[in-house]
Amino acid sequence: MKQAILIIDFGSQLTKLIARRVRDFGVFSLVIPYDSVNSKIFIDNEIKGLIFSGGPRSVDDKNSPKLPLFVYKKNIPILGICYGLQLICKQFGGKLKFSGDREFGKQEITIKKLSPLTKNTHKLNKKYQVWMSHSDSVEQLPVGFDVIASSGDCKNAIIQNLNTKVFGVQFHPEVVHTLKGTALLKNFVINICKCKKNWNMKSFKNQMIADIRNKVGEDHVICGLSGGVDSTVTAILIHKAIKNKLKCVFVDTGLMRKNESQIIKNLFVKNYNIRLDVIDSSEEFFLKLRGVKDPEQKRKIIGKLFIKNFEKYTKSNKEIKFLAQGTLYPDVIESASKIGNSSVTIKSHHNVGGLPKKLKFKLLEPLRELFKDEVRKLGKELNISEQFTGRHPFPGPGLGIRVLGEVTKRNVEILKKADDIFINLIKEHGLYKKIWQAFCVLLPIKTVGVMGDDRTYERICILRAVTSVDGMTAESFKFNDNFLKLCATEIVNRVKGINRVCYDLTSKPPGTIEYE
Ligand code: XMP
């Protein structure tokens, strides 16, 4: 049974960050929405501590999120963050007040009393910068609780009941703007909850290999590769467990980056000796995309065709009972959490992981407990070269959503060349690892230029490079001017069909990373 810290999500945008921080201490963390908490979780895992996340609601609201009382009776240490602190107060009999004054952003707290939560990290009577985001505050503490720290507007910035090991912080220790926030979390996880630091990629890998063998038995597994890190690591991990009972399929859509198909074949066949069936379906993709300009329609066509090819393949391989997918933990958290979910479809994401349930396979999702950077670490543990695990994300529909407007073979070829030049220059200048994702986009409009003595009338290429933690928000990367000029010159000189290059400075939100 795995030791874990259970993080109960009340809808904060920062919940995943808490989970990340705990794992960085070498301790496994689980996130679960508040309305999915049940006793089974405590049977399946050795829960050593509970963290209640922040959330957008007010504890005094009608129908505000609460927890079943059995959770409090487990005698497991609790740390409530923001909404979590207020919930603790309410459920232990304290009183809250809604204040019109929101404390938002950076504040200073003063430590008033010693606590195991701040031991060796925060000094008595000293001030520390924290990051707050709340409007409700505690008016009356429940019996048995003490104030450890307070800020200008918030008397109860840190509270504790030492007997029951229940703690609360009104600020967010998980964000970098809170000084000593990580140290405070570590005090809770390691010193108060007494967790062992035994969560690492090596133990995870060995455990997963044994689990996969157990689960699959004598059956066969199919894994669709996309060229991305997640499906690659999934396949190689499963192959370690069940060898040739794994069948890998790569549908070549014609919409991959330059040399992509070759890179994948080399990795699987040459490096790992894994059987890989490549279905070259590019002609069919271009045919079906002919004349289609609408982004959503393009995505749907690509998704459907992908599935059609996949289904065709599986029909002739009857021994396959499992479908492997590179689902990651953020997807699991997101689909489990109903809190604050928007029903608006910004883009219908298609990846190999988006295959329909009617394929009637049992699912095998060995990465569903991992974050993206942990997948990269697992890749390293599996000896997959950094060249591969460190690659920027690439969307399922590929260049089909980066050639804006109609997708033709010629346009894809133009884009492939420009993209290759841009990415290689980024690598040559040592910038690749500093950027979350970089790529080129081909606009469907032409502009006039002059080359030699000739007038040109060609397309515009947009350079996009962003920094991000998880792709949910992003900032444009700050290149220096000379580098951008070099990219523009190289692309215009070497790629026939492009005579103008622009750099996109839009962040996400309000933009998205991809263009369609
Ligand atoms: P957006 O454009 O929504 O992208 O800001 C966020 C991240 O998701 C990637 N992306 C996709 N990945 N299938 C995928 O597997 C898709 O359909 C898809 N669309 C966008 C995008 O590249 C970025 O990393």
Image (cartoon, rainbow, N blue to C red):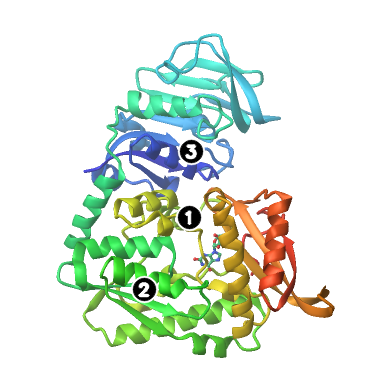
Q: How many marks?
A: 3
Residue marked by disc 3: 53
Residue 450 in percent (x, y) is at 83, 74
Kindly indicate the quadrant of the structure image that contains residue 460.
Answer: bottom right
Label 2, residues with CA under 10 Å away: few <14, some 14-19, many ≥20: many
Q: Is residue 81 above or below residue 248?
A: above
Q: Which mark is residue 292?
A: none
Helix, strand or loop at mark 1: helix
N-term mark: 2 or 1: 2
Considering the image in quadrants, where does the N terminus appear? top left
Q: Nearer the viewer, residue 212 or 162?
A: 212
Q: Which mark is residue 334?
A: 1
Amino acid, disc 3: Ser
Label 1, residues with CA under 10 Å away: few <14, some 14-19, many ≥20: few
From the viewer's perspective, is 169 left or right of 499? left
Would you say the beta carbon of the disc 1 residue lies within 8 angstroms of ligand 1?
A: no
Nearer the camera: disc 2 or disc 1: 2
Considering the image in quadrants, where does the C terminus appear? bottom right
Residue at image position (51%, 15%) is: 147
Q: Which mark is residue 265?
A: 2
Residue 504 in percent (x, y) is at 71, 59
From the viewer's perspective, is 498 left or right of 384? right
Residue at image position (47%, 53%) is: 337
Q: Nearer the viewer, residue 479 or 254?
A: 479
Gap in Å between the C-alphas at discs 3 and 1? 15 Å
Residue 218 in percent (x, y) is at 15, 71
Residue 82 in percent (x, y) is at 54, 32
Residue at image position (56%, 87%) is: 286
